[in-house]
């Protein structure tokens, strides 16, 4: 027996044992109702913004600020301080460098909460902020939030005019999450008359002397950025001298839009930033604190808190923690776990069927924002959270369809009808370039990325290879032939978006490893030959970036560099790379074997894996996510796929 064959036998045997343990461990995490749900965590900006919101909701009395949530605020402070970096700053992803906006937000929250300015953490933080350019270098949303309290000059932050509501369907050319943020924020900014802060409180010490607080000048006078800065000045004049009647009309329309989207949802858009701004908007609109809409908005927002749990935000075991989740990832977690377990062929059929029954109850049957561009399309699809009917997303829908292939359901007729609706909805949501985006169709007015409040780097929701690959896989799994026009257009999209080095960009996972694995799976599902050059180049690229320990890891820094940046191996990214190689026809190389071996050797005694680094993406270069189930679900899927390809005697 050759050494390579002997290694293959050993790896296969170890993979089989590892898979059995992992399946048992993942099955044990299923909730009684049939779903899987793990924490979704991010950076300290969530805790910092919570403290800002509490200042908004509970005004200080003179120099004293003693909100009823003081105990929680103290926990939020400790949560923030526990993640301070050695250089004094705060990052936006685990193991990343200090980032100015996160650091400024933390400084505000800590100072407001009573941290002594001469304490060692505050001194180091202040020094780091100044080294990064001071508060003037923070992003527009940080400055805008502070301006609501008079802590940053109002004239030097972007105007978010409610009159946007009067410009037809312009708001639907923004990404769904931007839309949900901007509308309550527009109400808040336009009606805010200045929120009080404790007497004497300011942030003067983190302003860089001699540096203007105004917008940075545009690179070119003849550019969209330059034009939008001029438009912003017009809006500021309009705020002072414009028609009050038009403004009232716009605010009323914004209010109605917001209230309508409270229904059938766990808060506005069911994600942290819109939920926070919605609470502020209700306040400036004059809703009393005991109004049902306010009570429910606060309840949904505070439901995002994880308190007194034994898992730290970075995914490591630690003492009890307090932190916010940016939203609930339950449908997403469930679909990935169910599909991974189904692919192994050894998971409990009854448990999977119970999952399928639960997923059917989460299908969207109401028209949401997507229907503005697709008014005649029958509602279907799945959202990310427990409830978010206005915002089903394409990626979740594709993932749920893949899961349903394995789960089945107690009511076969209901399942069949649901699948047909979802397939038709996905086909109707294909963009004109052949790809699929997250929530909308043809959301690609690129010039909107130059508006002054667009530096969250997610003003638009363009098509992307990762979602397109997953949609193709789901549609083909459910019977669409490879020669279907939508599949052909999707394949063409993937081929034209491949990077010169053979990889694909990953918008919703970090980064090129994620995009490449999903693009390859889509191409394979569509019958694209693994002997073609694009697939061969992708496989070669994946093998070329493998770490010495056999695994794969990629840093969030890849988004900053627009190129792959290596990181320590993670279970999820190792699984993605193995899945990509397998989809590309590589089933026996040493790279595949070493990748599988890495997964078998890093499995913990409880059958699960550990992962501290962020592998999920919210807004590239701005906001990253730790999906706490990724590290277990994706290795199960990779091991299952690997074992299916082994000869029977293995």
Image: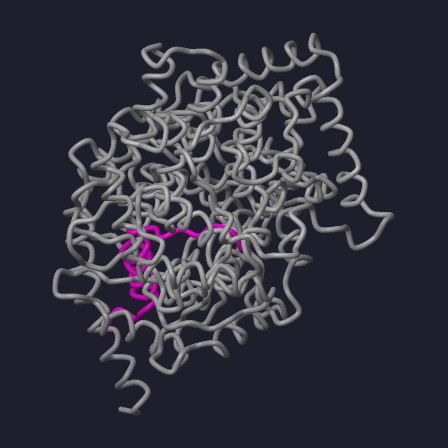
- Judge from the rendering whether residue 122 lies leftward or rightward of residue 233; answer left or right: left
Residue 540 horizontal side relative to residue 302, left or right? right
Would you identify the image quadrant in which residue 60 lies? top left
Q: Which residue is drawn at 80% across and 44% down?
A: 226
**Residue 627 on the magenta segment:** yes
Instruction: Work out which quarter of the rendered image holds the C terminus and state it.
Output: bottom left
Rendered position, 594 above or below 531: below
Q: Which colour scheme is used?
A: one colour
Which residues fall within the magenta stretch? Answer: 621-650
Which is nearer the eye, 31 or 223? 223
In this view, which residue lies farthest toward the top? 245
- Left or right: residue 135 versus residue 310 is right
Residue at 47%, 68% in the rendered image: 585
Q: Is residue 183 positioned above or below 127 on the image?
A: above
**In the rendered view of the protein, which quadrant contains the N terminus?**
bottom left
Q: Is residue 420 visible?
A: no
Confirm whether residue 372 shows in the render: yes
Q: Where is residue 423 in the image (x, y as percent from the top left)?
A: 50, 33
- Would residue 451 appear left or right of 362 to someone viewing this image? right
Where is 292 relative to 189, above or below?
A: above
Is 194 contained in the magenta span? no
Residue 22: x and y, percent?
A: 20, 58
Residue ranking furthest to the bottom? 2
In this rendered view, identify the residue nearer to me: 288 or 210: 210
Residue drawn at (32%, 64%), measured in percent from left and top? 571
- Spot the residue most to the right: 222
- x and y, in percent, of residue 229 in the image: 75, 40
Question: How many marks overall?
Answer: 0
Q: State the image quarter where residue 498 is shown.
A: bottom right
**Where, by quadrant of the figure, is residue 533 drawn?**
bottom right
| Rendered residue at 33%/46% (across/down) | 40
């Amino acid at each position: 027996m050759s050494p390579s064959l002997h290694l293959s036998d050993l790896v296969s045997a170890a993979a089989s044992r590892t898979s059995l343990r992992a399946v048992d461990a993942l099955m044990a995490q299923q909730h009684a109702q049939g779903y899987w749900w793990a924490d979704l965590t991010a950076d300290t900006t969530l805790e910092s913004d919570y403290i800002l919101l509490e200042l908004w909701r509970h005004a200080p009395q003179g120099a004293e600020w003693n909100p009823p949530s003081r105990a929680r605020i103290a926990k939020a402070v400790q949560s923030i301080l526990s993640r301070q970096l050695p250089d004094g700053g705060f990052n936006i992803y685990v193991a990343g460098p200090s980032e100015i906006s996160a650091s400024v937000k933390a400084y505000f929250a800590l100072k407001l909460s009573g941290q002594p300015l001469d304490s060692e953490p505050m001194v180091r933080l202040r020094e780091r902020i100044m080294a990064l350019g001071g508060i003037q270098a923070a992003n527009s949303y940080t400055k805008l939030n502070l301006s609501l309290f008079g802590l940053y000059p109002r004239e030097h932050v972007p105007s978010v005019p409610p009159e946007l509501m009067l410009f037809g369907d312009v708001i639907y050319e923004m990404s769904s999450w931007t839309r949900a943020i901007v509308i309550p924020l527009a109400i808040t900014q336009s009606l805010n008359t200045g929120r009080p802060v404790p007497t004497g409180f300011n942030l003067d010490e983190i302003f860089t002397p001699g540096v203007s607080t105004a917008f940075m000048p545009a690179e070119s006078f003849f550019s969209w950025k330059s034009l939008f800065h001029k438009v912003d000045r017009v809006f500021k004049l309009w705020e002072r001298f414009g028609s009050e009647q038009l403004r009232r009309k716009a605010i009323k329309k914004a209010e109605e839009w917001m209230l309508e989207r409270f229904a059938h949802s766990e808060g506005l858009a069911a994600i942290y930033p819109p939920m926070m701004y919605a609470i502020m908007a209700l306040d400036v609109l004059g809703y009393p604190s005991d109004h049902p809409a306010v009570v429910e908005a606060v309840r949904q927002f505070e439901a995002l808190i994880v308190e007194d749990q034994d898992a730290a935000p970075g995914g490591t075991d630690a003492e009890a923690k307090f932190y916010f989740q940016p939203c609930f990832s339950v449908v997403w977690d469930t679909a990935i776990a169910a599909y991974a377990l189904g692919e192994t062929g050894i998971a409990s059929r009854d448990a999977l069927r119970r999952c399928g029954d639960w997923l059917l109850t989460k299908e969207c049957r109401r028209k949401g924002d997507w229907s503005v561009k697709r008014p005649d399309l029958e509602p279907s699809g799945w959202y990310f959270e427990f409830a978010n009917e206005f915002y089903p997303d394409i990626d979740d829908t594709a993932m749920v369809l893949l899961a349903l292939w394995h789960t089945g359901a107690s009511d076969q007729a209901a399942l069949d009808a649901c699948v047909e609706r979802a397939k038709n909805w996905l086909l109707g949501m294909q963009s004109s370039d052949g790809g699929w985006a997250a929530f909308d169709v043809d959301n690609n007015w690129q010039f909107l990325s130059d508006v002054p409040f667009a530096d969250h780097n997610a003003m638009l929701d363009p098509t992307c290879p990762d979602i397109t690959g997953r949609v193709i896989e789901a549609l083909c799994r459910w019977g669409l032939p490879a020669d279907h026009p939508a599949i052909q257009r999707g394949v063409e999209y993937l081929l034209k978006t491949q990077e010169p080095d053979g990889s694909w960009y990953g918008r919703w996972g970090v980064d090129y490893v994620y995009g490449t694995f999903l693009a390859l799976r889509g191409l394979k599902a569509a019958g694209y030959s693994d002997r073609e050059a694009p697939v061969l180049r992708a496989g070669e690229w994946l093998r070329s970036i493998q770490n010495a320990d056999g695994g794969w890891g990629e840093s969030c820094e890849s988004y900053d560099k627009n190129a792959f940046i290596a990181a320590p191996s993670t279970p999820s990214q190792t699984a993605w790379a193995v899945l990509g190689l397998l989809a590309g026809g590589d089933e026996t190389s040493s790279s595949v074997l070493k990748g599988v071996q890495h997964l078998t050797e890093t499995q913990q005694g409880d059958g699960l894996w550990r992962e501290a680094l962020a592998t999920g993406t919210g807004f590239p270069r701005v906001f990253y996510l730790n999906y706490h189930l990724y590290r277990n679900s994706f290795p199960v899927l990779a091991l299952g796929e690997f074992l299916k390809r082994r000869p029977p005697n293995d």
